[in-house]
Amino acid sequence: MLAVPFSFQFSISQFFQSPFNVALARMVPLPLFRLYCYVVGLSYLAVRADHRQQVAAGVRTNLSGQTKASPPSDDLLWKTYLGIFEHYFEKLVNAYHPTDRLERYLSAQITIRNEDWLRRAYRQQQGLLLVSGHFGAVEYLPLFLALKGYAPAMIMRFKTDRLRRECTFRCRQFNVLAIDADQPNAAQKALQAVKRGRILVTLCDEFTHWRPHRDRHVSVLGRRVRADRTLDVLHRRSRPPACLGLVRRTRQGFALQIEPVTSGGEPTRLAERSWQLLEGYVRRFPEQWYQWRAVAQELGAYEQRCG
């Protein structure tokens, strides 16, 4: 397959973001490009059995006995693999598809559920924290908000310099403030974005970046671990309204589900509550979450780091 790097030691992210695939994302109609991403994704998993087995281990270990299929079925694993390919399809489209075509495509696809709460909180002009996860079409989340008339900011991490440049340029086109998590003063920039009335989008399921509380714990798919305190620190500075926001893929398009956590002002255990809400969606729609490999690899390392 000439579209992929010749060394299969590349990560799946690097694999999908080869120059040839980027060129296709700019030119090829979306239905055809999606099919292509499925084909190259299956090619990757066929060769990288270790990656495939890690995803399967994450699903089987953490969902065993907790879904209608017990243990999780091969059908669920198949859908989970396709969900991972869909994520990289969306990542490439989000960064590289022509802006006018992307805008038309997204505008016709999105609905927001519980938008009344979001609109009321946004109109307070106190800023807002929208916590999300590696779930569904999260790559489109800031653009969806911008297309609906909101002013979002998002804390992002980039695997390649090209992706950083393209995403930053795309965000400027849509009035989205991109905050590079790997650059200095990222936390300060995030706080400033909230104080200026933006909706700050951040993720709560990046286990390698969790900072453990000393005395609080949370259940992560049946495992009791120290709770993350990053979101609580961020929220404590100005206590803006906060919610969970997940873009779930549906047959009709994309549904941005808003789950309020706090209307602002009062203290709250934002990190714990956000994870609990996210885990509920993960259990209901496990094929739309693509952190199963991270659970298999990173959660144990986090527990060791906590001592």
Image: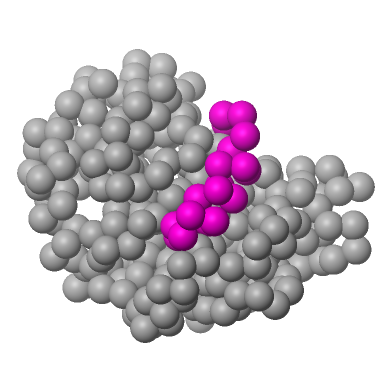
Instruction: Report x, y in % for residue 129.
Output: 53, 63
Check if residue 193 falls in the magenta segment. Answer: yes
Q: Is residue 21 magenta?
A: no
Indicate left or right for 167 with 97 as reference.
Answer: right
Judging from the image, the colouring scheme is: one colour
At 76% across and 49% down in the image, what residue appears? 211
Residue at 42% over, 25% down: 160
Quadrant of res 215 = bottom right
Residue at x-position 9% and y-position 37%:
28
The answer to whether residue 127 of the structure is visible from this angle is: yes
Residue 140 vs residue 89, the one in the foreground: 140
Q: Which residues are magenta?
A: 182-200
Locate the N terminus by quadrant: top left
The location of residue 119, given as percent across then percent down, is 37, 76
Give percent across and percent down for residue 70.
56, 75
Image quarter of residue 258: bottom left
Vertical placement of residue 235 versus 40, above or below: below
Q: Report if residue 137 is visible in the image.
A: no
Tell me which residue sits at (57%, 79%) in the image.
263
Side of 2 relative to 134 (left or right): left
Count of numbered tags = 0
Location of residue 264 in the rendering, given as x and y in whole percent from the top left corner = 60, 75
Q: Quadrant of residue 275?
A: bottom right
| For residue 285, above or below residue 201 | below
